[in-house]
Amino acid sequence: MLQFGMKLPFTYSDFLEQCKQELSRDDMDILERASIEPSIDVEDKIPLLKKWKDFDRSLRNELVRLRAVKKGKDSANYLRGNDELDPFIAPLAHWAMNQDSPMEAEKYLDKIRWEKMEEIKAGHYFDIEYLAVYCLQLQILERWDRINSGDGMKALERMAGKI
């Protein structure tokens, strides 16, 4: 079981390699679609992945709106997918944007993502959907492993300057 902030037990790519030995090609396709990277296409035949992609895109779009206002730009050029506002996501994004430290803001956002992953995996017990969430969570842990090593903070500061 993974927990937010724990030491990375193994890499995402190592996990996928192990899964290739045990899972079908269709199941591997599902795990490979489980990504924390921004997705333009939120449609997915797996409801859990669709929920994840919808949530993540809504969170990213809300952050874009706030960053655009801060920089005096039009957010329409940066929004992805439909432009639906989620009243539950807006205050979360607003809080993150008002942090003085890019590190604390990113940690908060990833904690929100982690909590959403925990919510959508409820009722799944070691099925492919559970493994998909495991992949997502491994990617977050791997991201923080990179941030905490070397030039991670510099990369976060560069990101904070972009929309």
Image: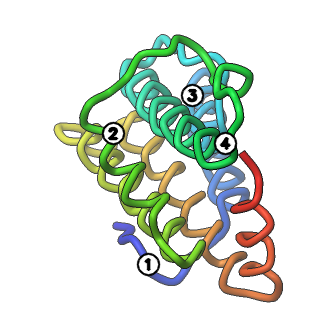
Real-space Cα separation, disc 1 to disc 4, in angstroms: 19 Å
Residue under label 2, please give it: 89
Mark 1 vs mark 2: in front: 2
Earlier sequence position, callout 1 versus callout 2:
1
Label whose residue precedes the other's in the sequence (1 or 4): 1
| Residue 152 appears left or right of 42 | right
Q: Say what secondary structure mark 4 lies in.
A: loop
Q: Are marks 3 and 4 in contact (CB under 8 Å)?
A: no
In front of the other: 41 or 80: 80
Residue in the picture at 46% in, 38% down: 59
Residue type for callout 4: Glu
Looking at the rendered image, the quarter that the N terminus falls into is bottom left
Element assignment for label 3 = helix
Say which residue label 1 marks.
Answer: 5
Of badges 2 and 4, the one in the foreground is 2
Discs 1/3, front? 1
Residue 133 pos. (x, y %): 43, 45
Give the position of the C terminus as an image quadrant.
top right
Residue picked out by circle 4: 37
Q: Secondary structure at mark 1?
A: loop
Asked whether the residues under the numbered discs 1 and 3 touch, taking CB atoms below 8 Å apart as contact, a structural biologist would say: no
Q: Earlier in the sequence, mark 2 or mark 4?
A: 4
Mark 3 or mark 2, which has the lower sequence index? 3
- Choose top left, top right, bottom left or bottom right for residue 148: bottom right
Q: Which amino acid type corresponds to the residue marked 2 in the rendered image?
A: Ile
Q: How far, Cα to Cα, is label 2 from label 4?
A: 18 Å
C-alpha gap between disc 3 and disc 4? 15 Å
Q: Are marks 1 and 2 in contact (CB under 8 Å)?
A: no
In the rendering, which numbered label is found on residue 30? 3
Spatial CA span between label 3 and label 2: 26 Å
